Image: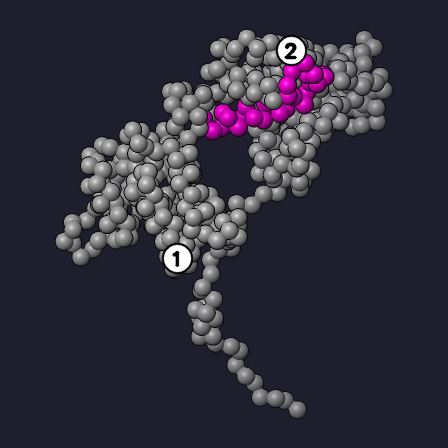
């Protein structure tokens, strides 16, 4: 679809001036093929200049694009630039501003969008090879120049066969691209959070195109038109929480694991008793743990959490390392938080530090060679524990399915134990609104106490019957 439907049916009206309380707006109004268009300006000079362009175009006998309401000459920039070229330029412009996971997500969205904006399907290449070439090479600024020969051939074909950016001016094409983004390779609908992420990324890309004057307006649907089909919730599924007996059995199995079991036991125990995010726990140093004196009556320890090292893949980081060191999620640069650790965790960590002969500057939880504990090792150990400890029907259920569910379990327990939400939010590194929205469905066990409070508040005084 390289051409856009045009028309010569154009009517241009006088400038409409509106004097508001704070500013005056001058709006150019015109009609193209029966569709009304409006363009507001802050000064009368700008409005008259734009209106003059429209009148000049009609005087020259120039056709207007029905989808945009503008003369054909006004869309020359978007028509001249291929989508693939624009997408690569946009990725490079955003690269330095994004973390590893955001870069990876951007590449995924640009890959799916670019495939949907090809003139024809790449029959001479395997579909998986095309997706890999785009995701891992074209939309990765660090890797693009080193693309192998077979990948370079695919990318040159994609560039030649990519539709122009002006394809976004076709509403039918926009709908087609969004349907492609909403659909998995097997034809099933993608998860709501995935669809929402694609749209969020594309919206930012469209704003960039508008700033570069490649597009005039954002062609993506707005408001209810786009959110109705992509509603998501951050609320935790109550079924994913593990009870104390299950947690004890899981940790005990990990501790007895032949390979690295004791190290992993200390890691999982920290998640269970203090609720840090896994990427925060693997970034902790020994010096971040304050252990009480063994003879002290108060045996609570304290954890200082100040850094996160999410695992994003070495091809997406500037350092070439698998993990990326970052500040705490949703917090200002350099911000820290402290979390109290149960006496049971104090005993576990003291024993762990002594057995591993760790020094203050060492990582608290290490891989076998002293490096950052790998996510694959963590996930494999947790899955093994679930499979060994849980009955088959529980193993197949959401109960503790993800390592992150250990954090959900701890935060929910704090709330159920009556810890004030503001304090839980501080320990968890969340805001209070996010905390309550995420865990409200999981809070339980307080109904009897609430009923007693309501009864103590009293009822309406009884009045004698009249009549």
Q: Is residue 175 magenta?
A: no
Residue 105 within the magenta-colored segment of the rendering: yes
Whole-percent x, y for residue 156 in the image:
61, 9
For the N terminus, which image quadrant? top right
| Vertical side of 4 occupied by 283: above or below | below
Q: Is residue 53 left or right of residue 434?
A: right
Magenta span covers which residues? 99-127
Rendering quarter of residue 86 = top right
What whole-number distance in Å separates the C-alpha atoms at marks 2 and 1? Answer: 58 Å
Nearest the viewer among 107 and 92 is 107
Q: Which mark is residue 157?
A: 2
Residue 327 in sight in this render: no
Visible residue check, residue 9: yes
Frontmost residue, 204 versus 342: 342
| Residue 342 position in % (x across, y down) | 29, 52
**Quadrant location, the C terminus:** bottom right
**Closer to viewer: mark 2 or mark 1:** 1
| Place of residue 25 in the rendered image (x, y in percent of width and height, measured from the top left) | 66, 28
> Regarding mark 2 in the picture, which secondary structure is present there?
helix
Q: In this view, does 219 lie to the left or right of 460?
A: right
Q: Is residue 26 left or right of residue 248?
A: right
Quarter of the image where one finds residue 24: top right
Residue at figure coordinates x 81%, y 14% from the top left = 63
Percent of width and height locating residue 374? 38, 32
Q: Looking at the picture, does residue 109 appear above or below residue 420?
A: above
> Badge 1 is on which residue?
245
Above or below, 199 against 151 in this view is below
Q: What residue appears at the point 36 percent right and 48 percent down from the top-left corner?
A: 253
The circle drawn on residue 408 is none
Predominant SS of the magenta segment? helix
Asked whether 464 or 368 is in front, the reply is 368
């Amino acid at each position: 679809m390289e051409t856009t439907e045009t028309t010569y049916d154009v009517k241009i009206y006088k400038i409409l001036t509106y004097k508001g309380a704070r500013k005056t707006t001058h709006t150019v109004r015109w009609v193209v093929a029966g569709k009304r268009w409006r363009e507001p300006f802050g000064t009368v000079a700008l409005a008259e200049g734009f209106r003059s362009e429209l009148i000049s175009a009609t005087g020259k006998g120039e056709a207007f694009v029905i989808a945009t309401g503008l003369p054909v000459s006004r869309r020359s920039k978007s028509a001249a630039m291929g989508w693939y070229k624009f997408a690569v330029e946009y990725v490079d412009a955003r690269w330095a501003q994004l973390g590893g996971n955001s870069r990876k997500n951007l590449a995924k969205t640009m890959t799916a969008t670019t495939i949907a904006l090809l003139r024809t399907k790449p029959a001479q290449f395997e579909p998986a090879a095309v997706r890999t070439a785009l995701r891992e090479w074209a939309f990765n600024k660090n890797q693009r120049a080193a693309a192998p020969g077979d990948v370079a051939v695919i990318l040159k074909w994609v560039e030649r066969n990519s539709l122009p950016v002006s394809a976004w001016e076709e509403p039918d094409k926009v709908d087609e691209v969004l349907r492609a983004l909403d659909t998995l390779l097997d034809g099933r609908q993608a998860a709501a959070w995935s669809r929402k992420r694609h749209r969020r990324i594309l919206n930012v890309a469209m704003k960039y195109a508008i700033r570069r004057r490649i597009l005039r307006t954002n062609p993506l649907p707005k408001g209810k038109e786009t959110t109705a089909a992509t509603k998501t919730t951050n609320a935790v599924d109550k079924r994913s929480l593990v009870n104390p007996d299950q947690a004890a059995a899981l940790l005990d199995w990990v501790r007895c694991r032949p390979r690295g079991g004791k190290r992993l036991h200390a890691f999982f125990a920290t998640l269970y008793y203090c609720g840090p995010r896994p990427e925060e726990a693997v970034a902790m140093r020994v010096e971040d743990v304050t252990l009480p004196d063994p003879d002290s009556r108060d045996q609570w320890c304290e954890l200082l959490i100040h850094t996160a090292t999410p695992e994003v893949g070495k091809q997406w980081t500037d350092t070439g390392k698998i993990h990326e060191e970052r500040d705490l999620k949703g917090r200002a640069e350099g911000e820290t938080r402290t979390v109290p650790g149960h006496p049971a965790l104090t005993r576990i960590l003291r024993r762990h530090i002594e057995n591993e002969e760790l020094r203050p500057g060492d990582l608290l939880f290490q891989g076998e060679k002293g490096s950052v504990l790998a996510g694959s090792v963590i996930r494999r150990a947790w899955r093994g524990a679930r499979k060994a400890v849980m009955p088959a029907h529980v193993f197949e259920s959401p109960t503790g399915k993800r390592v992150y569910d250990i954090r959900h379990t701890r935060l929910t327990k704090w709330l159920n134990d009556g810890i004030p939400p503001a304090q839980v939010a501080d320990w968890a590194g969340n805001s209070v609104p996010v905390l309550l929205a995420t865990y409200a469905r999981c809070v339980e066990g307080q109904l009897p106490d609430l009923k007693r409070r309501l009864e103590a508040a009293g009822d309406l005084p009884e009045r004698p019957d009249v009549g």
